[in-house]
Image (cartoon, helix red, strand yellow):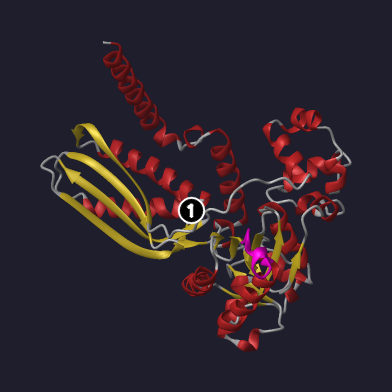
Amino acid sequence: MDRNIIHLDLDAFFVAVECKKNTRLKGRPLIVGGKSRRGVVAACSYEARAFGIHSAMPMYLAMQLCPEATIISGDMEAYSQMSHEVTEIIADKAPLFEKASIDEFYIDASGMDKFFGAFTWAVQLRKKIIQESGLPISLGMSVNKLVSKVVTGECKPNAERHIKTGDEQSFLAPLSVDKLPMVGKQTSTFLYDMGVRTVGTLRDMPLKFLVSAFGKNGVSLWNKAHGIDESPVVPYSEQKSISTESTFEEDTIDVKRLKSILIAMVEKVAFQLREQKKLTSCITVKIRYANFDTETKQIHIPYTSSDHTILKVVQELFDKLYNRRMLIRLVGVRLSNLVYGNHQISLFDDTEEAINLYEEMDYIKHKYGVEKLVRATTMDVNKRVRMEMNMFKGKVTKNLVN
């Protein structure tokens, strides 16, 4: 049975929500992002894109390109609410769907052709979303998630397209290599320098050559160029929070060590947040004293996923919370009120330098492991944790042998 994978992507989502709230903004160059000169563009209307403006662009440059553009700070609560409404429409109709981000969905409609046609059903669903939400949305369908995502990107804005089974490679061949998902600026520049500009050219390159040039990513590039993607549509479930806590071998009153542990915790949960393409607006710090009394303190903040923002709040909460000066046996950090949203398009008042830094840090952590890139203040903590884990493994091995 052929797979039928549908990709739905809300067009210029933040902008569309703002235009729904204020219809006078429709048809005008509109930018959502940080209003300071050092801020960045989170999203922009198609009218603004005509001037060369794009997401993650420094705001000062966007204003040079289009001085008459309207700038709006952004409203993550409104975006989250509209995303939830669209999710509910899809959940009511789709047999199996995955929410990939705040404005992006995959549906596995395999087997529907037996009844009334998967693409016909998908088109009807798209019309229902537009009618009930008032938002424009584009749709692509093919045999897998990879090709369907590219199809959606090519048919935008507010359109639909179906690439039939067997036509994947002919569809991809003339496209630029940077149209392939997860082929970033560095990889595409490297390919351009090699004379590889289209997916068709990339497809014709030997697998061994790509592996020698890109390592494991070479296999991924080869598969993408051939339109191969076996990844499943992962059933959607709403995650309520991301948390971590640490119970100490010995109760402690060493505040310096406690704060270093909290920093390491923030690095861990913030990275998980960005990996899942989510933002948080509620931060909780937890401590448990030696007598097992447990206390927590939380605060609501603007949506974020940045280490430095979360860390500042966690340190402030800990200072307010730890006032009994008793030995502590456990500390923890929890992030809740989660919504979908990439950090690079949601830190409205962040700088281009900060965004680039987080992207590079996350790339290293994703490739080599979270513990491979940490703040200097947490190096001793991470080293101690690894030593304790190795000691624990040694004890387990010894017990098994005996």
Report the side of 220 relative to 36 (left or right).
Answer: right
Which residue is at 65% across, 45% downward? 230
Which residue is at 75% across, 64% downward? 162
Of the residues shown, which amino acid type is indicated by label 1? Ser
Q: In this view, which residue lies farthest toward the top?
A: 402
Q: Is residue 117 magenta?
A: yes
Q: Quadrant of residue 292?
A: top left
Would residue 11 be seen by someone viewing this image from the given angle? no
Which sits in the foreground, 377 or 368? 368
Q: In this view, which residue lies farthest toward the bottom?
A: 24
Which residue is at 62% across, 77% downward? 16
Q: Is residue 257 magenta?
A: no
Give the crowd class for mark 1: few <14, some 14-19, many >=20 residues within 10 Å: many
Report the side of 42 relative to 265 (left or right).
Answer: right
Q: Main secondary structure of the magenta part?
A: loop
Q: Quadrant of residue 378?
A: top left
Residue 35 lies, with reference to residue 143, above or below; the image says: below
How many circles with numbers are drawn on the protein?
1
At which x and y percent is residue 236?
Answer: 49, 58
Q: In this view, which residue lies farthest toward the front?
A: 114
Report the side of 47 relative to 36 (left or right).
Answer: right
Residue receiving disc 1:
306
Which sits in the foreground, 321 or 83? 83
At which x and y percent is residue 265?
Answer: 38, 43
At which x and y percent is residue 352?
Answer: 62, 55
Report the side of 184 relative to 324 (left or right).
Answer: right
Q: Which residues are magenta?
A: 109-118
Secondary structure of the residue carrying numbered label 1: loop
At which x and y percent is residue 254?
Answer: 24, 36
Q: Quadrant of residue 190?
A: top right
